[in-house]
Amino acid sequence: MAPSMETIGFVGVGRMGANMARRLKDVGGRVMAVYDTDAKRADSFAQEIGAECVPTPARVAELATVIFTVVSDDVGMRGIFAADDSASLFAAAKGRLFVNCATVSPEVHIDVETLVEQQGGQSLEACMASSITQAREGTLYLMCGGKPESFARAKPMLEMLSANLRYVGVAGQAARVKALVNMVMNINTAGLAEGLGLGEALGLDLSMLQEVFSQTGAGSRVLETDGADMQNRDHECYFSAAHAAKDSGIAMAMAESVGLRMPLAQATLEQYQRLVAAGKGELDKSAIAELTFKDRQAQI
């Protein structure tokens, strides 16, 4: 099907999915239908962009030829593609292309591709290494895995969403790369939180300390995005602590599968799990600083 003839649907219109849909709508994409487990959110968003709010994932696939899925975890992903559920995407997969943007286990992406192809559809993982602002502006970093023909079909739409579009390989490979990206990012975030926490305890000026970090080997992308937020306790969510815990967990499972020990990744995972257990999972990942600043620890 020619790109100009494709119609678009979204399953999952939270912070990322909604902004991706807005971006596609802005640049002429034909966004026809949206579904979310939060029906009120889906209805409000559908009215905003002039799409139809539908009661099931299957109905999204009936109304659209390309369906973006942006769900939270493995359970959610398997649920929307369940082979034994007439309301799932599986029921209307024939001829459809599913672009799956969630960070889930590589095995889930592989299984989804198999299920969809059995029904005569196509599946592509399009893993995102960016946040809400980039989704809205169409400047996501996207890593894609799946059949080359699925990537070719999705590419015109993905180019509307991305400033950096990379085809990684077969199904599962992009998810592996994304898990490693987030694992390293989370380790960097935890390290920065400890550096700033210790600096504060030693009576150092944290603005000065961050400037020094930025000009030395302590500099990082995380310093740019999270340093001031950690200092100011501004944890407005762009990438949640709960998602950080999930993604570090995926990476640790991958490490265990090949018999590799990763003590830094394990320690970081445990820190984020502490935040989630304390009811702070919906704060931004920068909230890990709440565990490392001396005068804040008692509040967790």
Image (cartoon, helix red, strand yellow):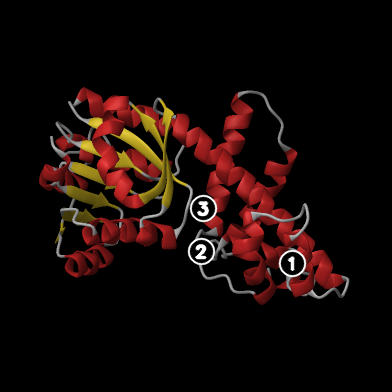
* Spot occupied by residue 227 in the image (x, y as percentages of width and height): 67, 66
Whether the residues at callouts 1 and 3 have beta carbons within 8 Å, the answer is: no
* Spot occupied by residue 142 in the image (x, y as percentages of width and height): 42, 43
Whether the residues at callouts 1 and 2 have beta carbons within 8 Å, the answer is: no
Mark 1 residue crowding within 10 angstroms, few (<14) / some (14–19) / many (20+)? many
For the residue marked with disc 3, what is the amino acid? His
Query: Which residue matches tag 2?
Result: 282
The residue at 54%/45% (across/down) is 247
**Which callout, 2 or 3, points at the residue further toward the start of the chain?**
3
Marks 1 and 2, how far apart at CA:
26 Å
**Which callout, 1 or 2, points at the residue further toward the start of the chain?**
1
Quadrant of the image for the C terminus? bottom right
Would residue 286 be visible to someone looking at this image? no
Residue 210: image tag:
1
* Spot occupied by residue 188 in the image (x, y as percentages of width and height): 68, 51
**Location of residue 194 by image quarter:** bottom right
Residue 243: image tag:
3
Relative vertical location of residue 51 with respect to residue 87 in this rendering, above or below: below
* Viewer-closest of 32 and 78: 32
Horizontally, is 182 left or right of 8 in the view?
right
Whether the residues at callouts 2 and 3 have beta carbons within 8 Å, the answer is: no
The residue at 66%/55% (across/down) is 189
